[in-house]
Amino acid sequence: MDAPAHTRLRRKLNAGFSPAVLQRLRPRIEHAADRLLEEISAAPDPDLIRDFAHRLPVLVICGLLGIADSLHPRCVSLSDDFAAWFADPMRSAISARKAHAAVSELTEIFAGTVRARALSGAEDLMRLMIEIAREDEAITPEVLHAQCVLLWLPKSEDAGGILKLDQWVTTTRDRCK
């Protein structure tokens, strides 16, 4: 998508990251963090990075996009497949196929979520994206799904601009004291 349609979309999507919206997400993020901490406390060989900091951004983005809880573990796995390809400077054909398959499956998950959210009254980022698409004919279903993928990709660096990895670790360390 090129300007000016891209500019319009970005401007409208910024509303989904306003301080008020992010504050409403806080309980959901805290719940996800608490759930992961409970799992870590019961794990025989817990690892804060692997078991918490690695998974939390995916759970946060799942919440932002209204993805069903039952799909969260699969989303973590798909995210791992893509990240393994992206982080490998040698990028083999096998890892490229795996990454492509992961993005394709994520796109299907997003398409299903769009269909479900279009019928619901839920207020989340996916619902905002659906409303934007209804108002702007330049935003086709394919563009909407691509925007979901683009929101998804930076999960290991920055969960949609909400939390930074160092903040997760600090927050977790404080909770574990």
Image (cartoon, rainbow, N blue to C red):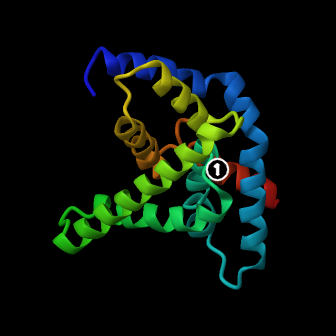
> In terms of depth relative to the viewer, which is nearer, 45 or 26?
26
Residue 47 position, x and y percent, is: 62, 72
Q: Residue furthest front?
A: 119
Query: Is 140 left, or right, of 17 in this rendering?
Result: left
Q: In the displayed structure, would residue 37 be above or below residue 138?
A: below
Residue 98 placement: quadrant = bottom left
Can residue 83 be spotted in the picture? no
Residue 141 placement: quadrant = top left
Q: In the displayed structure, would residue 45 be above or below residue 53?
A: below
For the point 61% across and 68% down, the residue is: 51
Mark 1 = which residue? Answer: 168
- Dot 1 alpha-carbon crowd within 10 angstroms: few under 14, some 14 to 19, many 20 or more: some
Query: Is 87 left, or right, of 36 in this rendering?
Result: left
For the point 47% across and 49% down, the residue is: 111
For the point 50% across and 19% down, the residue is: 12
Residue 32 placement: quadrant = bottom right
Can residue 2 be spotted in the picture? yes
For the point 71% across and 35% down, the residue is: 121
Q: In the displayed structure, would residue 5 be above or below residue 50?
A: above
Residue 120 position, x and y percent, is: 68, 39
> In terms of depth relative to the viewer, which is nearer, 45 or 78?
78
| Number of numbered callouts drawn | 1
Q: In the displayed structure, would residue 96 be above or below residue 169?
A: below
Query: Is 86 left, or right, of 61 in this rendering?
Result: left
The N terminus appears in which quarter of the rendering?
top left
The C terminus appears in which quarter of the rendering?
bottom right
Residue 139 position, x and y percent, is: 38, 28
